[in-house]
Amino acid sequence: MRGRLRTLLALFPMPHLLILSALVIVSGQAYGAEPVSNTVTIYDVKVVESRPYDRDIFTQGFVIESKKLWVSSGLYGQSFIERRDWPSGENRARLELPDKVFAEGLAMHKNDLFLLTWKSQTMFVIDPRRLEIKDSHSLPGEGWGLTSNGESLWLSDGTSRLREWRNGTFRKTLLVTLRDKPIPRLNELEWINGEIWANVWLTDQIVTIEPTSGRVTRIIDLTNLLPRSLRARDTDVLNGIAQDPETGGIWVTGKRWPSMYRIELVKRHSDKH
C-alpha cells in the first residue's frame, strides 16, 4: 500500500509540506510562525552532474563507500541489495531478499552493511564482499532510513523521531523539530559533515538535523529536480542521499528514477522567528 501511495503522489504532486509562506505544515495542520529563536535556512539546488540510474530500483538505501555504490530496493517479493563499482557503475552484484522482506534503509557501519526492514522488526547484517546475510538484530518497530557516523547507527521509523543504535543497544531517541514543531515522515538518512540529512516522505525536500538537539537547521528544496519529461507512470518520490567520501560530492535520486544527480546548495533565504 505504501509503495502504491508513493507512486500516486509522484504522479499527482502535493503542495509543499514544509515551505509555505510563513507557515509550517506538519501532519496536515498549519502552524503559524511562533516567536522562537530558531533560524531555518532554505536552499535550492544546482545540478552539477548526472549519471544514469535504473528505473527498476525502488530506492530505499543509497550509499557510496569503499569505491562502491550500494543500493537497497523495496517492495514485497521484489526487494534486493545491489553493489556496483563507483563511479564506473560496472561489476554489478545483487542479493535477492526473501519475499516476506520489504527492504528499507541501508548503511555501511564498521565494515558491514546494515539493512532495515519495514515491518519485520529486523535489521540484517550483511557481508559486503560476499553479499550474504550473516546476522540480524531486533527492532522495536518499523524501519525506514539508516545512516552511520562511524560510531553509531541512526534509524528513522517514519515518525518525527530518530533512534541511535550502538553495539547492539538503542541508546538515545531524538525528537526532530522545525521551529519547535515535530517533523514526521523522516525517511532515508545520510550523515554529512556532522549533521543528519533526511528525506521527508511525501515532499520534494530534505532537512538537515543537528544530532544533539534534533533541531532542523536547513530545508533543501528539490522541487522539479527530475524533469517531467523523464517521469514514467511508475516514477515515485524523491528518496536517496549519498555523500562520496572521496570527493565530498552529494548525490540524490528517487524511487524508479532514471538518473542520479550530484547537487550543490544555493541559498535562498533564512527565516527567523
Image (cartoon, grey):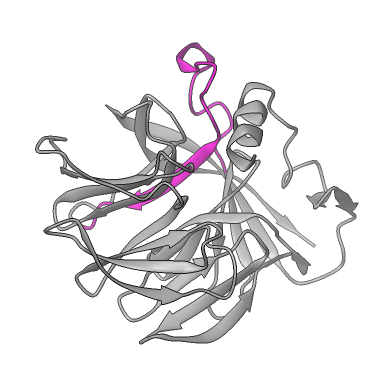
The quadrant holding residue 151 is bottom left
User: 46 and 6: which one is in front?
Assistant: 6
The quadrant holding residue 129 is bottom left
Whether residue 154 sits left or right of residue 132 in the image: it is right
Give the quarter of the figure containing the N terminus: top right
The residue sitting at the top extreme is 229
Q: Position of residue 117 (x, y in %)?
A: 47, 59
The residue sitting at the front extreme is 99
User: 35 and 97: which one is in front?
Assistant: 97
Q: Position of residue 55 (x, y in %)?
A: 38, 26
Q: Which residue is drawn at the image coordinates 44% and 29% (left, top)?
A: 256
| Residue range corresponding to the magenta coloring | 221-245
Residue 229 among those drawn in magenta: yes
Q: What secondary structure characterizes most of the magenta part?
A: loop
Give the quarter of the figure containing the C terminus: bottom right
User: 184 and 30: which one is in front?
Assistant: 184
Q: Position of residue 125 (x, y in %)?
A: 30, 68
Q: Which residue is drawn at the image coordinates 66% and 58% (left, top)?
A: 40
Residue 175 among those drawn in magenta: no
Q: Is residue 190 visible?
A: no
Q: Which residue is drawn at the image coordinates 17% and 50% (left, top)?
A: 68
Q: Which residue is drawn at the image coordinates 9% and 38% (left, top)?
A: 91
User: 23 and 109: which one is in front?
Assistant: 109
